[in-house]
Image (cartoon, rainbow, N blue to C red):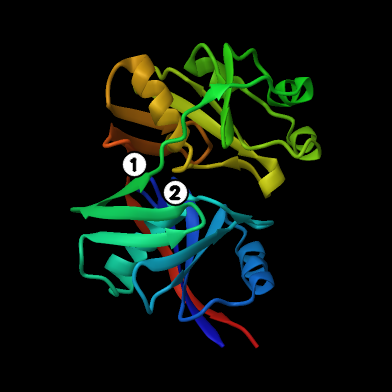
Amino acid sequence: MEIRFYHVDVFTSRVFGGNPAVVCLLQKWLPEELMQAIAAENRVSETAFVLTDRQPYPLRWFTPTREVELCGHATVATAYVLCELARIVAADELSFTTRSGELIVKRRGWDFWLRLPVWEPAHWDPPARLLQAVGGEPLETLRAHYAVFVYENQREIELLVPDYRLMQSLDAPPVVATAPGNDVDYVFRFFAPAWGIDEDPATGSAHAVLVPFWARRRCKWWLRARQLSNRGGEFQCEYRDNHVWVCGSVRLYAEGLIHLP
């Protein structure tokens, strides 16, 4: 069996930036353990598997260790692959069925806009050992699917050195560390050791919780954000019609075939 795949970088204008994703084109679902093995072999943050013979397109995402409920960058990657590389879709709007419900991606020129659900964060008292593992002194701790630690300024985010093994031993939820940015509306980092991802390079789904939070703090509905990972991620976000919209640019790194017995 051969599976066509594309390896792309998302939320970046250059190869080797943003967040890498592998998109695998299927006609029917593979056994779950085989999809997980492929994701582990790829060793990128997420591998997306999409069925191309029906619409809306069924879509699933796997980290190297587990299937996840939502992945922003791999959804944008899949839309880019279907429109620009595999040329399966000519329309400017794509719909995907996922474990998080329907996701919409709209193409505007060379950019792709992903519509995310709104996750309203609420106050949360995290375990003391999780605070210790992440580090620093957050001003607020919130939770909405992900844990959100709010810090005073960008420098505090840059200086965080989490204890990933401690976080993994706690089986903690992914933690988004965020603060006002120096030249953008907010900056953040994303830690998910329990998902097999110590630090994610550019996390689209994080804006489902960050945009509602920062839109109210900044009193604006159009926001710019930066992820302070080693690879970096640049985001334009919009909060409208009770949805979060995140813009992503994509660059192709590699394509080929996966050969299976």
Give SS at disc 1: strand
Closer to the N terminus: mark 2 or mark 1?
2
Q: Nearer the viewer, residue 121 or 18?
A: 121
Report the residue at 58% width, 35% height from top.
Answer: 146
Q: Is residue 141 left or right of residue 11?
A: right
Q: Quadrant of the C terminus?
A: bottom right
Q: Exactly how many numbered labels are in the figure?
A: 2
Give SS at disc 2: helix
Report the residue at 23% width, 55% height from top.
Answer: 107
Task: Give the percent coordinates (x, y) of residue 120.
Answer: 46, 29
Task: Identify the residue under disc 2.
Answer: 72
Which residue occupies the extreme left position in the image?
109
Q: Is residue 146 above or below residue 187?
A: below
Q: Is residue 211 left or right of residue 121?
A: left
Rounded to the nearest whole Å, what is the CA distance between mark 2 and mark 1? 9 Å
Task: Give the percent coordinates (x, y) of residue 89.
Answer: 26, 71
Q: Is residue 12 above or below residue 158?
A: below
Q: Amino acid at mark 1?
A: Val
The answer to whether residue 16 of the structure is visible from this angle is: no
The answer to whether residue 128 of the structure is visible from this angle is: yes
Q: Amino acid at mark 2?
A: Gly
Task: Give the percent coordinates (x, y) of residue 210.
Answer: 44, 29
Task: Identify the residue under disc 1.
Answer: 246
Quarter occupied by residue 29: bottom right
Q: Residues within 10 Å of mark 1 (few under 14, many from 20)?
A: many
Report the residue at 48% width, 52% height from top.
Answer: 100
User: Which mark, by number, is residue 113?
Assistant: none
Task: Give the percent coordinates (x, y) of residue 118.
Answer: 41, 36
Contact (Cβ within 8 Å) of mark 2 with mark 1:
yes
Q: Is residue 152 left or right of residue 102?
A: right
Q: Is residue 242 left or right of residue 258?
A: left
